[in-house]
Amino acid sequence: MSENLTPETDLTKPVIPAAARQGKTSSRAIVHFVAPLEETPLAAIDNVDESEAPLSLWADAWRNLRRQPLFIISAILIVLVLVVAFLPQLFANVDPTSCTLNDSSAGPRGGHPMGFTLQGCDVYSRMIYGTRASLMVGVFTTLGVLVFGGIMGALAGYYGGWVDAILARLGDVFFALPLILGAIVMMQLPAFRDNRSVWTVVLTLVIFGWPQIARITRGAVIENRNADFVTAAKALGLSRFNALVRHVLPNSLAPIIVVASISLGTFIVAEATLSFLGIGLPDTVMSWGNDIAAAQPQVRNNPGVLLWPAAALSVTVLSFIMLGDALRDALDPKARKR
Amino acid sequence: MRYSRTSKALGLAAVLAMSITACGGTSGGNNTSAAANTSKAITANGTEPQNPLLPANTNEVGGGRVMDLIFSGLVSYDVHGKTVNELAQSITTTDSQHYTIKIKSGQTFSDGTPITAKNFVDAWNYGAAAKNAQLNSYFFAPIKGYDKVSADKSTLDTMEGLKVVDDTTFTVDLTAPESDFPLALGYTAFYPMPESAYKDIKAYGQNPVGDGPYKLAPGGWKHDTSITLIPNDKYQGPNKPKNGGVTFTLYSSPDAAYTDVQSDNLDVLDQVPPSGLQNFKTDFKGRFVNQAYAGNATMTIPSYLPEFKGEAGQMRRQAISMSIDRQQIIDKIFYGNKKVATEFTSPVLDGYDANLPGSDVLKYNPTKAKELWAAADKISPWPAGKVFTITSNIDGAGNKEYITAMANQIATTLGIKAQLNPIATFKESRNLINSKKLTGASRAGWQADYPSLQDFLGPLYGTGAGSNDGDYSSPAFDAKLKEGLAAKSVDEGNKIFNQAQEILLKDLPVIPLWYQAVQGVWSNNVTNVEFGWNGVPLYYNITAK
Amino acid sequence: MVMFTLRRFLQLIPVFFGATLLVYFLVFATPGDPIAALSGGKPMAPAVQAALRAQYNLDQPFWIQYGLYLKNLVTLNLGQTFSGQDVSAVIGRAYPVTARLAFMALAIEAIFGVLFGVIAGLRKGKLFDATVLVASLVVIAVPTFVLGFVLQLVIGVQLGWARPTVSGAAPWNELILPALVLGLVSLAYVIRLTRASISENMNADYVRTATAKGLSRGRVVLVHILRNSLIPVVTFLGADLGSLMGGAIVTEGIFNVPGVGNLLYKAILKGESATVVAVVGILVIVFVVANLVVDLLYAWLDPRIRYV
């Protein structure tokens, strides 16, 4: 995408014949051979039906995405996780909240394939029922930081100057505030005090988590704002703002997607942390994070209780990482295999 | 990523707990093994003291551990919690209200200055005076004149109840009879301070000069890292160190300390973390102890809750008590490392009685519990959908698990909703309790300051007492308490205190759960490790190999 | 460039005051009474409480408290902790330890992250790529408090390869294990960021040009692809340095590192504003400086980026 303007070769050096440099040369060594026209991509380009409306970057990406196996697998996984989240009762018929110490840390048995927690709750059932809260925290927090942090970072990086000074420094201030302190205060707000829910956690994580995405976006936008295609677009009469939205941002998405897809997982784990400290989800809301935190002291003797929700978390994160990868490839015309 | 790190309430040593020393009288003889090396120092776990090291300002384990080794008081407590005279020659009284205290002559502080009666009187006056803002000042409350020196903005600094008679004698006048006053005199707050301390009390608090078996090594207090103590050669008492010193390594979590003992980097650990409870007996074959100490765990049900008022309230409290299967929680959550409570004090104390009349209410009895709950509902119904909550701060490890288990048991037995109400910080939970804003039960517990039944009763259930979190008030109980305090002897007092407990067993201002036990482990490098009545190792007896 | 740097340092002033004011307010707004908590649930004489409140200005309204704090700050007095120590001394002990730990964690992230990321990016979809993906999933899905605990048990206790905890002086060699645990989650980010950038740039025109010119593959990767792929990685590492310097509560707790994380955590729980504000104040400065360095690195990595 970007062109490197630094001089590549030292012209003062004598050119050594290819044969003499064997072993160091690229395997794609220069072959003096001209392909017949029908074997080159040029034919395909010439075949374009010019009467058709040009495809936008997004439509182009979608067309490409549909055919990628990576996308198909990740989409199936995500749909599965969504179904579990919305209809847990289809997958588990044991009440995850009926726990008795008689079953404390008991192993698997009929109807309870993954055994029991320290409190005697069914591990499988809790994993299934915990999907909703965990997924909500992960997805909505990620969306929140993407939208808020993305806008802040894009504006800061693109316009520079005083806009950058204000927005980037605001990010510094928020990044320096300890999350725990913020969460303790947030939970006290009259609106949240008595009806703590997933949204409280999401809001807390967004408020104290946006600067990271903002910084990544800002860096990517700075990298691209002076690229040739942006200059070209502006020369063609596109307004500065439109150039940002239509050209700079789409070309800056790669690192943002990478960070966002991993963040999804770390946000789910962060919820565990907050819950453990009593400033996250209340105990009545089941979540993978809650269960992972509760299982920590028994990890030496009964690791299964911890591993199952962690595995569910891994599969979810994996599917989003794969989706991110597929999306990134689709959005990058150069990476596409023709 | 920054979230995953900000996790878990490791650290924050249980602020609630207060420890006092085990400067025991049993000198143990010289049965040290052949390999023992009395000049080699040992290491033990500790936490950063939360206050300057002043006797009247040390109210938590981190500082208490150190203070009790570098100071000794008029009396000390042996391994079983029996009070023995240490610096005191005699403590005499005829009416449990006017005491004459004689101290042994020829005793000195670690800097060589002699210990006089004036050192005690000055230190106590300093601790009591409001202007010095000492956290333990309320310990001097029984002394005549305390009300004046502790009044808001008071500039007075002497209590009229304390009088120096001569170099080795002083008298103490109390405002009312207190038969267990001599028992309290081994507590940290009552230690003497040398004359030189008052010149620069701030510097003294960082580098105190005491009179205990050990003294602070020069520059020994490395904040947040370690505290090094060396033997005090001026010490003449019964607890002469059998090692070359004690270095407390300061930990922010017991889990870290546990791994250090496992790999012999630390010699003694007096608190096995929850993650080690299931394994410590196999991790440390023959190098562990598991014994009761003077502390208990309870659940307070405040008397101001409308559902728990009157006769219905009493039945509900009894029903809740009978719906908790204490033994099962001990077995499953604590892996058997505690003992079911049968009254309100502790089994290590003199006067303890496991079979008080009425203690059946503390036994698991789901049928009776259901009956009582139904009977209470007839008088005033339990509000539909009301959740019985148990409030607890969860910034110290190990509270969440047992409260959740208890809530599950209560819910299952009584058919109501019950759950933990987690509070993020100790200061917030204290606020809820102090301002009487609890909407349900709360976690409670008590650790003895000194080995006395009264210490488990008066401060907790007396009308208007400082730690009476549930606002319990019973004229009958108060009368028994007063009668016990006026008794001629400690033994006689204990009988009356147990009668007072019978009243508590009917009213159940708190629901006793279990007695605390200490789980301690030690490394391959030390022997002769013993734990005292209060769960603190007898550091001076430990020998290095 | 000089003006740019200078301007950035001037921006520090409002940022510093903004952050300290905000954090001071947050501590002020946490529920509970710090003085009542000092007694640990035991009774405390009312006069003692009043005296302690006055000592820490807790009896004053918010603006006066903050004003008094600023006034002390001018004379470089950061206030005192509830245990009567100078905050400057407490922080002076904790920060060097955290800085060492942060530096090592960052080095692990940068070196291994870029290395694995480059290999994974060049061999996208191959075995190495998939292995790295699975390994980073484990790191992401298992919280630090579990991972650290298990590593400490296995490496420190069972195998005995390293001391399970860090001793008082916190020397470099003892910090390797905690730094590894600390760096692992961010390592996953760095690997995937590098991998994405590399695979994106591999198809760039200048790479084809360089290859076409007959440059060795190593040179193409190192000089052409890598340099042009580092901007997102550098951005991330810069931000991460900040959060590392903020201390790591869990990791420090597990390995008993006397650093800023635990200090800050305990101070927050106790409501000890002097300590919290001082730590955050220093953090803000670290952030601004780290971001300045990152911005200057942008210009070095990509000469088209210029600052005036």
Image (cartoon, rainbow, N blue to C red):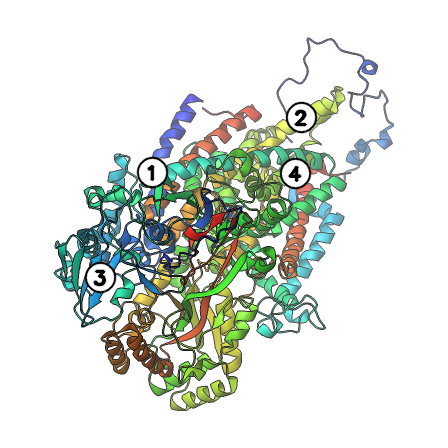
- Whole-percent x and y of residue C249? 48, 47
Q: Please tell me if label 4 and label 3 are on a single chain.
A: no
Name the chain under label 3: B
Chain letter of mark 1 equals C
Chain letter of disc 2? C
Residue B49 in percent (x, y) is at 36, 49
Tag nearer the camera, 1 or 3: 3
The amino acid pointed to by label 2 is: Leu
Say which element carries label 2.
helix
Marks 1 and 3: CB-CB under 8 Å? no
Q: Amino acid at mark 3?
A: Phe
Q: Which residue is mark 1?
A: C88
B316 lies left or right of C24: right
Q: Which of the pair B135/B55 is nearer the observer?
A: B55
Q: Count up the numbered dots.
A: 4
On the same chain, marks 2 and 4? The answer is yes
The answer to which image quadrant residue A253 occupies is: top right
**Mark 3 packing: few (<14 Cα in 10 Å), some, or many (20+)?**
many
The alpha-carbon separation of the residues under discs 1 and 4 comes to: 43 Å
The location of residue B255, given as percent across then percent down, is 52, 52
Looking at the image, which residue is at 28% across and 35% down?
C76
Nearer-N-terminus badge (1/4)? 1
Task: Look at discs 1 and 4 and give the one toward the viewer.
Answer: 1
Q: Which residue is tagged 3?
A: B140
Q: Is residue C286 above or below residue A200?
A: above
Crowding at mark 4 (Cα within 10 Å: few <14, some 14-19, many 20+): many
Asked if A92 appears above or below C162 in the picture, the reply is: below
Q: Amino acid at mark 1?
A: Ser
User: Are the two marked residues, 2 and 4, in contact with CB atoms closer than 8 angstroms?
Assistant: no
Q: Are marks 1 and 2 in contact (CB under 8 Å)?
A: no
Q: Quadrant of the C terminus of chain C?
A: top left
Residue that badge 4 annotates: C196
